[in-house]
Amino acid sequence: MSGTELPVIAAVDGSSHSMDALDWAAREAVVRGLPLLVVHVRQLARRVGQEAQEREARELLAAAVHRVAGTAPGLRPSTLAPLDFPSAALVSLSRDASLVVLGSRGLGGFRSLMLGSDSLATASMAKCPVVIVHGGRAEEDPRQASGEVFRDIVAGVAADESSEEVLDFAFETAAAHPGARLRIVHGWTMFSSMLSGGPVFDRGAASDAAERSLAELTAGRRAAYPQVEVMKEPVNGSATRTLVTASATAALTVIGRRRGGESLGLGLSPVAHTTLTHAMGPVAVVPC
């Protein structure tokens, strides 16, 4: 397949969270014009016979394909059931994917945890963007489910080159959804302003410098995507609270991760880790 045909991968395990992720992935595959690959990883650690696991996998994948037919009529997903550890399989498959989508917790997750270990590991190590779908929103706009409206896309960025991939993904996603509004959130402090050569104790000047940094980061992309409405939101202090709060009503919250992570959470900044853990809607983690 060419680069533009790399699939959206939806990971399913039968949990309600994975079914929410499947619905999200199917709709996104249609919007982006990409194939959908539904993956169920048969786990190495399970004390279940191979024949029983294969039967469970066939039944689960058949149910997933049937569900996709209702969510995204006309989409013809392919399926795969590798035998591996879930995060290892998904990280390997991410090398040839446009997007990996999975639920925030699977069947093995503890209810007290907001984010499962497989979700965190995949988001930490995948080679392509990963979307973690946090299910159970208290109020779901029925127009969102039907694809009639796509609410705000919120991107958390640093005012430097590390945000290039985050902004590319956020603008591309907003452009794929007519009417979507892109909110770009950047947390700044007096200390970060001083590190970048800004004013020492002038809060107003530091705020203006953050505005200018955001304008410089987005200028070329705004010209490339003139149809996308953009809101720039410099936030004095950590952007975490703003991102988590916005995630409750955002269609997607986009954060970055440093490449090269080889363990749980490595590469996620404190802002990104907290946002991913406490978000109340889908979060895209983009390797930077």
Image (cartoon, rainbow, N blue to C red):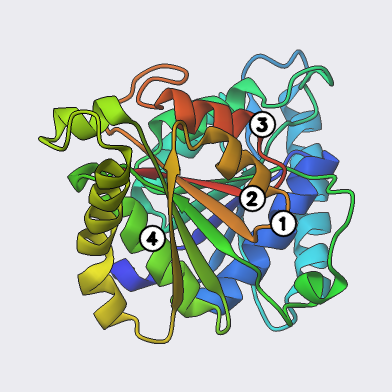
Residue designated by label 2: 246
Q: Is residue 154 above or below residue 132?
A: below
Which x, y percent locates residue 165? 29, 53
Front residue (pair 173, 12) = 173
Which mark is nearer the camera, 2 or 3? 2
Calculate the distance from the C-alpha at mark 1 to the C-alpha at mark 4: 19 Å
Residue designated by label 4: 169
Front residue (pair 185, 10) = 185
Residue designated by label 1: 249
Amino acid type assigned to the residue bearing label 2 in the image: Ala
Cβ–Cβ under 8 Å for marks 1 and 2: yes
Calculate the distance from the C-alpha at mark 1 to the C-alpha at mark 3: 14 Å
Q: Earlier in the sequence, mark 1 or mark 4?
A: 4
Q: Secondary structure at mark 3?
A: helix
Amino acid type assigned to the residue bearing label 1 in the image: Thr
Q: Earlier in the sequence, mark 1 or mark 3?
A: 1
Residue designated by label 3: 278
Amino acid type assigned to the residue bearing label 3 in the image: His
Residue 69 marker:
none
Q: Earlier in the sequence, mark 4 or mark 2?
A: 4
Which x, y percent locates residue 234? 41, 49
Front residue (pair 176, 155) = 155
Which x, y percent locates residue 246? 64, 50
Q: Is residue 6 visible?
A: no
Q: Is residue 98 visible?
A: yes
Calculate the distance from the C-alpha at mark 4 to the C-alpha at mark 2: 18 Å
Query: How would you rate the neighbour count of disc 1 (Cα within 10 Å): few for under 14, some for 14-19, many for 20 or more?
Result: many
Amino acid type assigned to the residue bearing label 4 in the image: Phe
Identified at 81% across, 76% down, the residue is 143
